[in-house]
Image: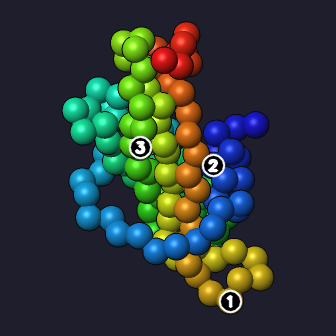
Amino acid sequence: MKPRDIAATFLIACTAHAQSSSVPRTPVTDPRPLMIAAIDSPSGTAHGVLTGDTADVMRRKFNAKTPVLIDVTTEKRYAQAGCSRLKLKFWQDDVQLPGAAGPRTQTIEFGINYCRDGRPPRSLS
């Protein structure tokens, strides 16, 4: 399954709630640079806006003209250098789902164990 299909599936399956977007955001074509930025950040956070083909597919799929936003938060730093448990949140305002009364904010959150080299940590301690 392609990353854009995975992201679209996540947005379809998620619950809606309104959120604010007042933080500076880095344009990215996939979340990996934000994941590394969150690992490296003293605050453990990184914020971005999805660009490129995947973002275009998602906007068309959900009939939304708003950007797809990504927030990454470090939930735990592991003993292995450069490895953390991350929470990724993708969200978009004005998403129109089939059968829904009107547009709304759609959000999906999930966790991942991730290291700067793209692999999972050897240990979760």
Closer to the camera: disc 3 or disc 1? 3
Dot 3 or dot 1, earlier in sequence? 3
Dot 2 or dot 1, earlier in sequence? 2
* Figure quadrant of the N terminus: top right
Is residue 34 shown above or below 77? below
Query: Closer to the camera, 56 or 74?
Result: 74
Tell me the tag on residue 7.
2
Disc 3 packing (10 Å; few <14; some 14–19; many ≥20):
many
Query: As shown in the figure, which amino acid type bears the numbered disc 2?
Result: Ala
Q: CA distance from mark 2 to mark 1?
A: 23 Å
Q: CA distance from mark 3 to mark 2?
A: 15 Å
* Residue 66 visible at all: yes
Q: Residue extending furthest bottom?
A: 101
Q: Which residue is mark 3?
A: 72
Disc 1 packing (10 Å; few <14; some 14–19; many ≥20):
few
Residue at the (55%, 10%) spot, across then down: 122
